[in-house]
Amino acid sequence: MIDDKKTVRENLKLVIDLYLPNIELVGEAGGVQEGLKLLRSIRPELVFMDISMEDGTGFDLLALYGQVDF
């Protein structure tokens, strides 16, 4: 999960634990650059990600990760 707000990440964890017990959270990051490192190291099947973060957008991160343009 990638979001620059810690409280949002904590709340999402609670919702996932409560309603989606089969989903295993394998990492979290607080921004685009940290998220890029996480995605490259873990290669998750699903990513919960904020659109607007302090160091860029979720679309910026996707472009950096997949080297595609949006």
Image (cartoon, helix red, strand yellow):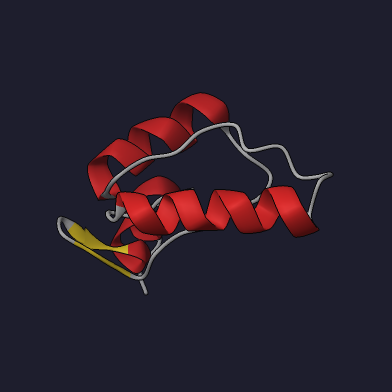
Does residue 26 appear left or right of residue 49 in this picture?
A: right
Does residue 53 appear left or right of residue 13 in this picture?
A: left
> Which x, y percent locates residue 48?
54, 57
> Which x, y percent locates residue 58?
36, 63
- Residue ranking furthest to the top: 41
Q: Residue visible at 48% across and 25% down?
A: 41
> Which x, y percent locates residue 66?
45, 51
Q: Residue visible at 71% across and 37% down?
A: 24
Q: In this picture, is 23 found above or below 60?
A: above
| Residue 69 placement: quadrant | bottom left
Does residue 60 appear left or right of residue 19 in this picture?
A: left
- Residue ranking furthest to the bottom: 70
Which of the pair 25/55 is nearer the observer? Answer: 25
Q: Residue visible at 58% across and 34% down?
A: 43
The reply to whether residue 47 is in sight is no
Q: Residue visible at 68% across and 53% down?
A: 16
Which of the pair 1/5 is nearer the observer? Answer: 5
| Residue 34 placement: quadrant | top left
Q: Quadrant of the C terminus?
A: bottom left
The mark total stands at 0
- Residue ranking furthest to the right: 22
The reply to whether residue 36 is in sight is yes
Which of the pair 52/11 is nearer the observer? Answer: 11
